[in-house]
Image (tube, grey):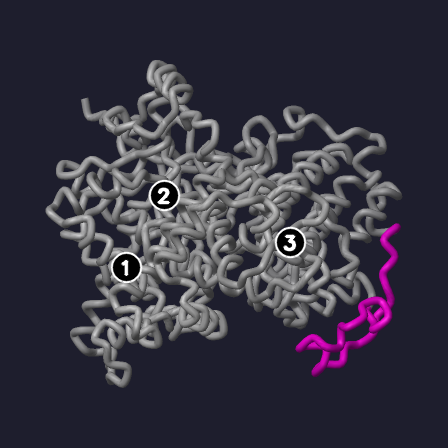
Amino acid sequence: MEYRQNKPKFPLGNYINNYQPYYYRNRNYNNGNNNNGNNNYFYKRRNNNIHKPIIRKENTWLYTTEELNSSTPSIKDGYTPKDELKQRWKACAFIMSIGITMKIPQTTIATACIYLHRFYCRKSLKYYPAYEIAAASLYLASKLTDAQRRLKDIIIVCISKAQKNAKLNINEKTHEFDKWKKTILYHELEVLETICCDVNVDHPYSHLLNMMEKFNDSDHSNIVKLAWCFINDSFKTTMCLRYPAQIIAASALYMACKYEGEVLINKDVQVAWWNEFNINEHELLTATKEMADVYVRIIKKNNLGNISKIPLDKNPSVAASDAIKRKIQSTLLSPENINTSITSSPSPRNL
Amino acid sequence: MTEVINNLNDTNTPTNDINNDKKKENSNKKNNRKFVINPINNYRKEKKIGEGTFAVVYEGVQLSTGRKVAIKKIKLGDFKDGFDMTAIREIKFLQELKHPNIIELIDVFSNKTNLNLVLEFLDSDLEKIIKAKDVVFSVADIKSWMLMTLRGLYHCHRSFILHRDLKPNNLLISSNGQLKIGDFGLSRDYGEPSEVMTSQVVTRWYRAPELLFGAKEYGYSVDMWSVGCIFAELMLRTPYLPGENDMEQLDIIFRALGTPTEETWPGMKLLPVPSKVEFSIYPKTPWRNLFTAAGYDALDLLEKMLTYNPAKRISAQDALLHPYFRNKPRPTNPSKLPHCTKEDINNSKKRKNLDGEEKISKRLFV
């Protein structure tokens, strides 16, 4: 077709190459200049007297682990850090399950998850139940990323997912439907305000595709698929609040390479691939360890014997999740193995 | 007393993981820190300028600087789908686009149940200037406006954003003559391959032929067609291709530019409308008699912008590099461009009414 001629191959990747992404331009992430506090405009609202919002690194939306463990509004309201993480996890899993049944694109789902994580850095779980915010942020994200679904459809899926009953017959005139509609419409504005209208998000997916462009010489589609799934799962944790998107993409890629036992080498440049993209080795390794921890925890919880029952079916790409299962079964992911392999200093040529 | 200083909270946060160097920077910053006034109290609405279905626009003042601003209050209420899409798009794209030829989003704040966008205050637009018959403008002035439009549009396109609603009404003009692209309510991110988009965009007179043919996949060339129509309108001082419905619009385009064939536009027959409808064949109307004052280079650029085949239509970047902008006369300095005064607007309004009456009377007689 004629119209495709103008389309870039990896549009988001090119965007980053040619053009400084919004994230770096306005937040001044690296040089840390004060940006006149432009983003402060929103947080004076309902709970102003109860919680002071945390502002970190000149509003990059990045926080340290200690902060997330000690000073989020939910924790000040009496939640334990573990509880909060669990609630966040549940809410993101809820978003993903709705997204998959409604065939919403993965970037939209990821955007919704990021909105949700950012929201709970400024508002408490006590006043804003997780599932309601999850539904609202998904609806908002679907509008903002041109994947809009009808509110009616989203509500119906929400109810059936929340009650865990797929065959539920839902009528528009029921009280339940009305309640969900009101909460979604109310919380939509609440989410938009709390995230300071900062709706443009930097996604790891684009960074991943951008990185893989450098290794065009051979077929790495299995690695990309696997890394893509690791990124999907990382959104259930608070990783997106602690690491820039590029680091998440790199650690997913690192882990995928490890599992597949493949080596990424660019023949023109004689350095490790993460040095090519100016990624801090230490940061990469800590992020990777954390990403792997999720799976390790699942294995521990389910006892290593029952590996086939691990709930890893939440990934959209069936093939890749199968790959993970297969690799787990071959015990590559046993806790000892991961720790030793990742913490040992990586030699540039072998990884 | 009502001014609340929000930024104070910032000083309380721990800075454990920041290196010594950064600490030094931070201490410097603390001395230079600007305090942010609570935006709800920072703006004062003065008078209503306009009202649409989803928003009311007020003229206002930014109290901290005394700057004149436009405040767009988004109505929230009984809408079925919650928050209005056009407002949400405007926030999304204007936050990303910062350019002298694109309208600036200064601030966003909420007030109970309303969301307010604070935009740059721009008093006139290109449509007003075109319609004000008392204002005379030269070839150099047209060149200057085209240059500013293309610069703004090129910035949108290199940020992977389609505007999709370019028309003289949306090209706003500031008090110092700078032209700024506004109204991003129909814009969208462009770039994901094989993505289906709606063809019901762009005001009809400025809509590209592939959209009228019902194409679901299109690109930056859609905006370039609109720019071409605006260019012709600037030279003629009336809309170049005014159609009253979609089929009439196609007819008018074909009468003016000739009917496209499979040779001039390969793949045309695959689109939804031409595969079903046979069009009557017209030759191209020669432009020389129509655009009497235009130079050779201007007509060359116009022809490249109004090319049927979207793949061959000129891009914003190439248009900026076209010799038209380098040849004499040089584009006028924006501060010296003809400006539309309020009297002119009033006069043109009167004239508009007269025109309308004339039209009605003509129709009655015919």
Give percent across and percent down for residue A106.
45, 63
Residue B21 location, quadrant = top left
Q: Main secondary structure of the magenta part?
A: loop
In this picture, residue A172 sits left or right of residue A24: left
Judging depth in this view, the residue of A270 and B39 nearest the camera is: A270
Mark 2: few/some/many CA within 10 Å (<14, 14-19, 20+): some
From this view, report whether residue B6 is shown above or below residue A328.
above
User: Whole-percent x and y of residue B98?
Assistant: 53, 36
Disc 2 is placed on an element classified as helix
* N-term mark: 2 or 3: 3
In magenta, the rendered stretch is: B259-288
Which quarter of the picture shows residue A111?
Answer: bottom left
Do pointers 2 and 3 mark residues of a single chain? yes
Residue A213 numbered tag:
3
Q: Which mark is residue A242?
A: 2
Q: Is residue A203 visible?
A: no
The residue at the point 49 percent across, 62 percent down is A259
Q: Tell me the SS state at disc 3.
A: helix
Which residue in the rendered view is the most extreme toward the left? A78
Amino acid type indicated by mark 1: Trp
Which label is found at residue A89?
1
Magenta segment: does it hold B344? no
Q: Residue at x 33, y 34 (%)?
A: A56
- Mark 2 or mark 1: whose residue is earlier in sequence: 1
C-alpha separation, residue under disc 2 versus residue under disc 1: 16 Å
